[in-house]
Image (cartoon, rainbow, N blue to C red):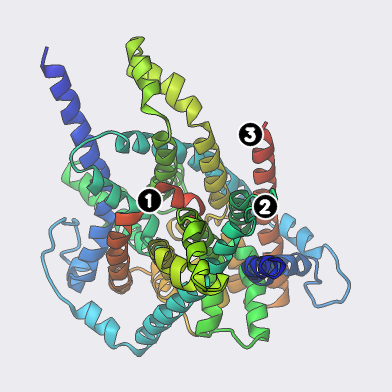
Amino acid sequence: MKLRPLFRSAAFTLLVIGVAFTIIFPLYVVTKNAFVEEKEISGRLAWPWSPIPQTFTTDWVYYLLSESDLVSSLTLTIFSTLLSVGISLLLATPAAWALVRVGGKTNTGFRATGFILTFAVMSRMFPSITVGIPLAVILIRLMLHDTVLGLAIGFTLFSLPYSLIVMKSQFDTIPPELEEAAMVDGYSRFSAFIRVTLPAAAPGMATAAIFSFLFAWGELTLPLLITSANRPLSVMIWRYLRGATMAQGSAIAFIQLIPVLIFTYILQRFLKPEYLAGAFKY
Amino acid sequence: MKGEQVTYWVLIAIPIVFIVAFMVYPAILSVSYSFSHPEGGAMPNTLAYEQNFADPEFSEAIGYNLLLVAVAVPLELLAGIFMALILSRQFIGRGLLRAIMILPITIPEVVFLVSMKTMFGEKGVVNSMLFYSGLPYQNLWLVHSPINFVIIVLVEIWRTTPICALLILAGIQSIPAQVYESASIDRATTWMKFRNITLPLLKPAIVATILLRGIDAFKIFATPWVLSPSIPTMTGYAYNIYYLRFALNPVGLARAAVSADILALFIVVFSYVFVRYTSR
């Protein structure tokens, strides 16, 4: 009689382990590829594939970090990603705050949540390919083609609606009385926002920033279309994807993976499922 | 008070202007490109459309794209509900599993594809596992075949199940526990509870998941382009035309725009019909 629940919980545990394994295993494959010698990737040690690395070398990673192409690609990716996080927060934070306050006490019937969700869904409806080719033409006209700012504008298109959702739900949790108390003390509405509400909204800003960072960092289709000479890391990996050997591709992928793992670790601590409503990236 | 309202509306307008300038306006330009003359004439015409529809690869791309959406999205939803049900239970390591589950959302697509190339390559992981277990192995995973289609769908499920699961999970957590308690008093089985309580109350979450996931599924590009190079999706077709076949010339521009615009049209029609149908 006691056996059945035991069996069921064992099966459940196995299921959980299986799911976790399925998610982590591909990442292990990339990491292993990045640190084994050539002969284990395409040479005599390559077949059959062994789950345990038989050789170890940091040559690939060193080689890539000394290659000037890749170093400039890495710096381009870092700067454009950070710039896009900045633009995205700079535009989304005041807008989300205004959306929460605009009705004021006199209810104008304006529904901020509905507005933001519509905005997010509508902007997701534009495929990268439809936007990307004309955007490249526009950026060339604006002399922003192949620049950090041009790339950052492209990235921001995806993170902005998402940042709006996160910031709106963050400002919803901050009571307006806090701001009003500061205004009684002589602050204007705007400086009360800067000095009182904004510091209280720091967790939401962190979430929005990390998500914007991660999305821009891994974005492939748009940079593929709007850059030609200066290309971010995703596009550099893309070049190797149709080639035969995966060693260089894996090494770049590993470099690209490190910040993702760090930020994902930070992110999961204060992630709320509903934040993800606008976070559909793929 | 009046001035304050104006400031609010200006602050709200700035992101909208940004999106209109760099997303909506390019999309409109794309439509005008699709009607431009491939040889550079001034009059708008439908030559690019005619050329595209005369190209068998284009209709193949449309069919393949739609088939992927139709097969992958329901499976992703089912896998998402399944994962959400796991995560809604209390068990040791639940926090850890949730942390791991976020990874497919945050891992760059290309990083994952590098891994999949190694998985299904000729000397890859899958073939080696077949070899170890004494089964016949093949090196045809990555050429166009039904198995290849299955692989692409599985890869998409890997990448998108977590996002579906988290959305569904938010829905599950909003169902009050008392409903389940009173069902238990009436001796409802687990399945009956799922069928008669969880599923109906989850409808809004499921609708949102299908809508958002469906929109994004249409845009599928990198996975088939890397894992099944012979048949592109609609994005892949436009990319091939513009960057490979007619490298950056007006013919390619017009024809790529046609493929891109038809894709956008599919998404708009899907969203409109879906929202109309489900909001009744």
> To which residue does mark 2 refer?
A106
- Pick whichever, B158 or A170, lies toward us: A170
Q: Nearer the viewer, mark 2 or mark 3?
A: 2
Q: Secondary structure at mark 3?
A: helix
Q: Do marks 2 and 1 share a chain?
A: no
**Label at residue B278:** 3
Disc 2, disc 3: CB below 8 Å? no
- Disc 2 and disc 3: Cα gap in Å? 33 Å
Q: Is residue A270 visible?
A: yes
Q: Secondary structure at mark 2?
A: loop
- Disc 3 and disc 1: Cα gap in Å? 41 Å
Around disc 3, counting alpha carbons within 10 Å, would you say few (fewer than 14), some (14 to 19), or many (20 or more)?
few
Q: Is residue A72 above or below residue B151?
A: below
Determine the chain carrying the residue at label 3.
Answer: B
Q: Position of residue B120 (x, y in %)?
A: 33, 54
Going from N to C along the chain, the mark reached first, 3 or 1, is 1
Q: Position of residue A124 (x, y in %)?
A: 59, 56
B182 on left or right of B24:
left
> To which residue does mark 1 refer?
B140
What residue sits 48% from the left and 73% below the top?
A194
Around disc 1, counting alpha carbons within 10 Å, would you say few (fewer than 14), some (14 to 19), or many (20 or more)?
few
| Outermost residue to the top | B186
